[in-house]
Amino acid sequence: MLLQKSSGSNLPLHWCDMAKSDKDNPAKNSALKFCVASGMLSFTEVNVFTSVDLTSAPKIITDIDVLGIWLRQDGSISKSIFDCKSTGGPAIARALWLSGLLKLVGAEDGMLLMGKPAERAHRLAARQLGINVFGSGGFDNFASATNPEYAALRSYGGDLNNWHLLHDAAQKFSPGGEILHILHQEVPLTQDVARSFRRVISRILPLKGELNPAKSSHLAIFNEICVCMALMLTMMVGDLRNILDLNEDEKEFGQVVRYYLWGGPEGVANLRRLYELLRAHDSNTEQETALVAWPNLLQLLRGLLEAPTMLRSPALGLRELALRQLAKHDDIADRRTGQLFAEARSRQFAKRIALYSAAVLKLPTEFADRIAEQIDTLVELAAT
């Protein structure tokens, strides 16, 4: 992909429908707490699109109330969908719908949180579809029995109010809202991480000009970029760890990464031909490697590949930190976040991901510096 200016896009009016009065909010909050207690990276109100854009304005098929992503040590991921419905028809009808959604987005687990009792026969039939159905109050009992931390959990990611703060802040300034939309459209459900990586960068670059590290809402948006970068880099490292040897020389290492990012030798060759054509008409056209801050990316990937099993904690820590930017600070939640960053290589990797995010999006390094300062403060707090 060559770096060209984007004309931007109009956000769907309901792209972040997070009404504070939504009757399903208690169930969503429970789902978020479960994700955090279980060590899953969470996202809320994730819109589902077709895999290929068929019109100039992609259509939203449906949305996911809460998405939990488990980052395995082997670099693979698994996704859990939490569908929260306080009202509606019989549980089996919703379970049938949810089983189809799992297949569509490549998720492994589905949990249906109902606001009324669900018939045993319906729950049993849903299990055959890979769906767990919970009637009124049933999910909290299940979550508490599954994870002792759930009942007393205090975290930033497990509190739906903090998600409201993030989305409300994003809506108050246009670039922030569109950046958040791009991130959550491209990243949580991606099944082609190299493509999503390129698209996130190329779509956000034209919007980054108004971001100011001195404003907490802008820092929260940058932190969310870091969260999504951490997820994509985790998936990329999971792919590359089995095909790259760190003993390979720089040229060979770079060639493999280039082919991986742009779909093989043919994709790279086509991009180079396109570059030469555009270069003949516009001397300011940049090569495809400029889009991804090539030297920075290679250096970052080499560092991450040295400890590929240690990428989960920095991703989870950055998720907590992103929501902390606008939340009311809580000492217990702060200590928990600090413990995530205190794990082996976590603080180092989180800082490097923040530095790369600022570099690739041509943002002031102050964004990454502020994130680094907060990480250090939280780690020190966790140690006391």
Image: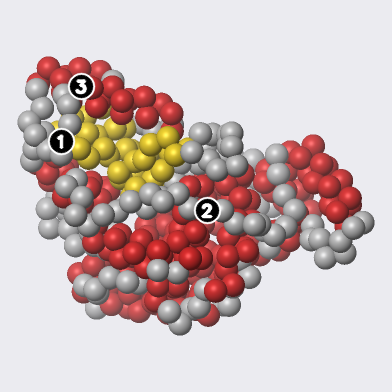
Residue 142 sits in quarter:
top left
* Circle nearer the viewer, 3 or 1: 1
Residue type beneath disc 3: Ile
Q: Residue at x 40, y 64 (%)?
A: 171
Residue 52 pos. (x, y %)? 58, 34
Residue at x-position 73% and y-position 61%: 290
Mark toward the start of the polypeptide (1 vs 2): 2
Residue at 87 percent of width and 46 percent of height: 273
Report whether 256 appears left or right of 10: right
163 above or below 118?
Answer: below
Return the x and y of residue 211 as percentages of the image width and height. 52, 73
From mark 2 to mark 3, how far is it between C-alphas?
37 Å
Instruction: Kindly give the residue lying farthest to the bottom in the view shown.
Output: 214
Q: Report the residue marked by disc 3.
A: 92
Under tag 1, what secondary structure? Answer: loop
Read off the residue under disc 2. Answer: 10
Residue 87: which numbered mark, if any?
Answer: 1
In the displayed structure, would residue 49 be above or below residue 36? Answer: above
User: What amino acid is found at the position of numbered circle 1 in the picture?
Assistant: Thr
Q: Residues within 10 Å of mark 1 (few under 14, many from 20)?
A: few
Name the quadrant containing residue 327. Answer: bottom left
Badge 3 crowding class, 10 Å Cα cut-off, few under 14, some 14 to 19, many 20 or more, is many
The answer to whether the residues at label 2 and label 3 have Cβ atoms under 8 Å apart is: no
First in residue order: circle 3 vs circle 1: 1
> Which residue does the image show at 48% across and 38% down from the upper left?
59
Q: Secondary structure at mark 3?
A: helix
Q: Nearer the viewer, mark 1 or mark 2?
A: 2
The residue under label 2 is which amino acid type? Asn
